[in-house]
Amino acid sequence: MQRHQFVQETLPLLRISPPCPSNRSPVRHTRPLHRFLEVTVAKKKPAAARFAAMSTTSLTSIAANIAATTTPPTPVITVPPGGTLLVIVDVGPMRVPYTVSYRGRTLIKSLVDRAEKVPLQPGEEVLGWHFNHMLKGWHHTIGVSVNNAPPIILENKSEADKDQDTSFGFAIVKA
């Protein structure tokens, strides 16, 4: 395909008006439009070649390598039969309520420090939490106490430690 034909076919697609042949054109073109299009198209070819090379690696193998090095182990809390589980939350200034849930139901939704007993069910269930901090000087600590023993800290984050201000977490409770 000749350059002139390529430009004439491409302009309607790009909705670009061709340069005015007169010297009184309101738009001053520093280089011919066909040269601009060739440079633009040429810059995209290496990226496509890189993508084709990357596409030979399976996403499963990439995810497995990343997960093994970056994912912390999931906490497992074992409660003996007939035992009790107390969730303890200590927070700094909050604008958005944090939530703690057990078995998919909200256990705590608050802006201040709280401690609540968990209505345990036999088997393995999920204890989850979410914090979204918006105020300066934020911090939060969530922990659990099994049978009134010293608390086990599940998560401790703060602005002073330069942690992310949004946090999702979970633990498995075996009762």
Image (cartoon, rainbow, N blue to C red):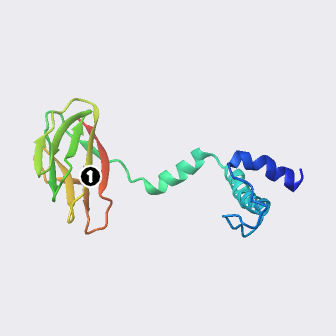
Going 15% across and 33% down the picture, which residue do you hit?
119
Nearer to me, 114 or 136: 136
Q: Judge whether residue 56 can be spotted in this image.
A: no
Q: Amino acid at mark 1?
A: Asn
Q: Is residue 101 left or right of residue 51?
A: left
Above or below 90: residue 58:
above
Label 1 SS: strand
Residue indicated by mark 1: 132
User: What residue lies at 14% left-to-right and 37% top-to-bottom?
Assistant: 83
**Residue 93 coordinates in the image, percent (x, y):** 15, 59
**The residue positioned farthest toward the right in the image shown:** 2
Q: Residue at x 25, y 50 (%)?
A: 131
CA neighbours of label 1 inside 10 A, class few (<14), some (14 to 19), many (20+): some
The extreme top residue here reads 122
The image quarter in which residue 24 lies: bottom right
Rendered location of residue 159, percent (x, y): 26, 65
Q: Nearer the viewer, residue 58 or 3?
A: 3
Relative image position of residue 157 (x, y in whole percent): 26, 60
Instruction: Choose between 118 and 42: the one closer to the eye.
Output: 42
Q: Is residue 162 left or right of residue 145?
A: right
Q: Is residue 25 above or below residue 11?
A: below
**Number of numbered discs:** 1
Image quadrant assignment for residue 175: top left
Is residue 6 in view? yes
Q: Position of residue 69 (x, y in %)?
A: 47, 57
Describe residue 123's horizontal placement relative to residue 7 as left or right: left
